[in-house]
Image (spheres, rainbow, N blue to C red):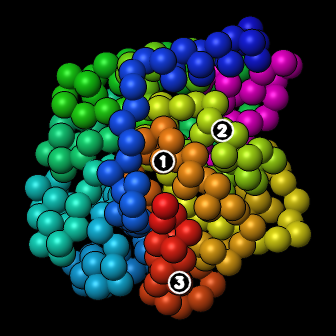
Amino acid sequence: MVTRRAFVKTSLATLALSAVPRSAWAAGPPSIGLQLYSVRKQAQAELPSVLAKIKQIGYDEVETYWNLYSHPAPELRRMISDAGLRVPSGHFDYEKVESSFDYAHQLGVSYMVCPMLPDNMQASSLDAFKQAADKFNHWGEQAQKAGFRFAFHNHNYEFRKFGSATGYETLIAQTDPKLVWFELDCYWVTQAGLNPVDMLKSLGNRVRMLHIKDRLPGVATSQKLDKTAEHFTEVGTGTLDFKAIAAAARSIGVEHYFVEQDEISKPVYESLTISLKNAKRLLAA
């Protein structure tokens, strides 16, 4: 069983792997990207015009997701490039990672990200997370051979306790820091009842990317992934302390920041504009 002592020991060891360079944006805001899942309805209809609008709003990068892979990788890469955007990262379903290394290579991503575990693994037992950790180590090795890195993106369910350990602690402790990296979703960490600043400090330079989304005030935390856990709002209009998050992220050299809002109630591009404007202000040094 993974103990808290083992988890902390692994986290501290990670910090010592190498000297983390100061972020290139120490004197100003970082380049901010958009996880395209936020505009999934629009992207399904007319992706090139959606990408052009995202660039017009002021985003520099995009992170792709599974439904976009109906486009051949060179075509998707060209559409993103033609819009003046970069694609450093893409989300690939757990069940399809094994068959997607060539696609990810052709797309040109630096990070191949598994966004979540299958439903039947999320709340079953620590054994499910140990099984996932074994897969992640294997995929991390395959990704390294293909010229990029493998990472995992969290939700809230990973922070449920099974005895003395959580699923997330198990993933951290049983994956190789040289092969498996993390994309920390600040909303879902907060929704689970934890502090993303503490999490960044614990994980150190294994966190290479952040999902930045905000959370409404006065709502209950939870560790079950369902509709009752969805309290999304535009960056800078909720309760997350992005100034503190940015300071912690700078200290460990986080590379990429993606706005994501799973559900949007405002007009979509108005929402994305608000989030970007506030993110640039709040994440600036």
Identify the residue at image location x=40%, y=64%: 28
Find disc 2 in the rendering and name its residue. Answer: 199
Residue 67: tell me if it is visible: no
Quarter-wise, where is residue 159 in the image? Answer: top right
Find disc 3 in the rendering and name its residue. Answer: 274
Seen in the image, is 206 located left or right of residue 48? right
Question: How far from the left and from the top, in percent, is residue 176?
Answer: 46, 16
Residue type at the position of mark 3: Ile
Identify the residue at image location x=26%, y=57%: 87
Mark 2 vs mark 3: which is more N-terminal?
2
Asked if marks 1 and 2 touch (Cβ < 8 Å), the reply is no
Residue 4 part of the magenta-drawn span: no
Quarter-wise, where is residue 261 in the image? Answer: bottom right
Q: Secondary structure at mark 1?
A: helix
Label ID, residue 277: none
Residue type at the position of mark 1: Arg
Q: Which residues are magenta?
A: 154-171
Q: Secondary structure at mark 3?
A: helix
Q: Secondary structure at mark 2?
A: helix
Seen in the image, is 38 located left or right of residue 119? left
Mark 1 vs mark 3: which is more N-terminal?
1
User: In terms of depth relative to the viewer, which is nearer, 56 or 249?
Assistant: 249
Find disc 1 in the rendering and name its residue. Answer: 250
User: In terms of depth relative to the viewer, which is nearer, 266 or 43?
Assistant: 266
Residue 166 part of the magenta-drawn span: yes
Label 3, residues with CA under 10 Å away: few <14, some 14-19, many ≥20:
some
